Image (spheres, helix red, strand yellow):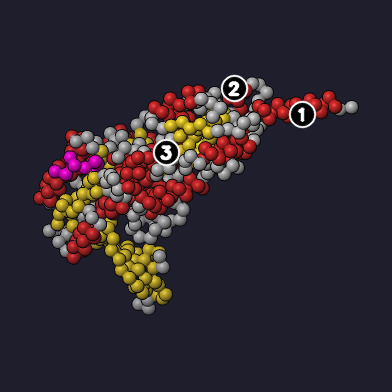
Amino acid sequence: MKVKFKNFFDGDHRPRILVVGDLILDEYVWGGVTRISPEAPVPILETRSETLSLGGAANVANNLVALGCEVFLVGAIGQDERGDRLLGLIENRGIETGGIFRFVHRPTTSKIRIVAHNQQILRIDKEDNRPITEKTEKKIVEFIKQILPSVEGVICSDYQKGILTPKIIKSVVSGCRKHKKRVIVDPKSSDFSLYQGVSVLTPNLKEVDRSVPIKISNEEDLERAAEYLLSLTRAEALLITRGKDGMSLYRNKEKPVRIATEAKEVFDVTGAGDTVISVFGMCLFVGFSHEEAAWLSNMAAGIVVGKLGTAVVTLEEINEFLREEMLRTSHTVLTLDEIKKVTSLAKSVDKTVVFTNGCFDIIHGGHIEFLQKARALGDLLVVGLNSDASVKRIKGPSRPIKNQQERANILSALKYINYITIFDESTPENIIREIRPDILVKGDDYKIDEVVGREIVEGYGARVELIPIVKGLSTTNTLEKILKSNRSGEKTRP
């Protein structure tokens, strides 16, 4: 995952993604309200400016471009001035427009939002939802067939404005199956049978509620609803967005994954779903797991809702957000699952993860110097701390002197350590396999061949570093000195 994100930042790899769906022109009228109309009890908006932005599937394409992708957009617009403006905005973003066709009998779909003092007070929709003609439908199907072999995946953005007909959806699904591509759908229809055969669906909670014969009152009901939809659509995963409650990821025969919202401040949720499917789709298409893609898309949504109006998120913003989150949660004792998520995200933005382990029973100067040097080798230092039971097996029944919570608290206070995880096993091999550190560190009182986990890290291309330790400083030596001092004191006592 580290290499994939590094390629995005360096511009070495631009995923080619096909976006199919309803194209919408988002219009914003910005102003202020200081008085009420004498004609009716309504506010008078004093207009200050007007802006245009990409909406619907066009906003999905815009998000993908901001993430460094090459995007082919498929949809239709009217033979009107709004259509010309929308097409101009799309072209200006560098989005391929060969799959955009012009309606003859329908206007361009637009949403006009009236905003006063950074608060949306009214929305005006201009649209015609009549089915598209067979001629337009045929043109879209033919374009999809031509372009599918050259892209890495397909995102369908359904706003129920008539583009994603059953025939077009079927064409996308069959084409993706033929060329071994994934297709992700943001659904709007309550009939999820239309989406049979897609790879992943990203509905919100309201869309799930109206599409299942189950009253959703709690987590158990939602899990049953997800199982129903997975069975109905034969999808590999279902990512349900839940507003302030974050997201839930469901996969066949796997435990649900709950992801808490990452939003710091919410100014406008317009287009947040477009950002989610864009980031999730891009990550999935280039090899991220469902869970990794979901975590990153959740973070991206947390960024975009902090912006006003239809907005996008960039890779640089995701990188900065991850950095802030890691700093915010550093010096924390985490479970192995939590450590896996943190280190996975850190490596995705080119952070070097260093790992070491030990009992750290009585912290001394040698420990401090060792940890300082270990941290200097990378961006993130994770310490595996032997549990009390593990220490007893290794050191004997009289150890540890301090319990695992005390030892963890002391380590947490050290600025060189980012994260700590406690393990019960005698060796940290399981942790090493799970988090796959870039560098495994031990003291030079070990030989390379004696380092537990060396074969694991070298097996996936990482390395082992031996750090010089301070001679004569160890917990065992410290304890012997204390005991010797006590015995000496007893002998001289009158």
Residue visible at 46% across and 31% down in the picture: 464
Label 2: state its secondary structure. helix
Magenta region? 146-154
Give the mark count.
3
* Residue type for callout 2: Ile
Q: Nearer the viewer, mark 1 or mark 2?
A: 1
Q: Position of residue 185 (x, y in %)?
A: 27, 43
Residue visible at 82% across and 26% down in the picture: 490
Q: In this image, 427 relative to 311: left or right?
A: right
Upstream in sequence: badge 2 or badge 3: 3
User: Pointer 1 and pointer 2: residues touching (CB < 8 Å)?
Assistant: no
Residue visible at 18% across and 34% down in the picture: 178
Q: Quadrant of the C terminus?
A: top right
Give the alpha-carbon distance from disc 2 to disc 3, as whole Å: 30 Å
* Residue type for callout 3: Ser
Question: Residue tagged by mark 1?
Answer: 485
* Residue type for callout 1: Ser
Residue 394's mark? Answer: 2
Question: Residue tagged by mark 3?
Answer: 344
Is 382 contained in the magenta span? no
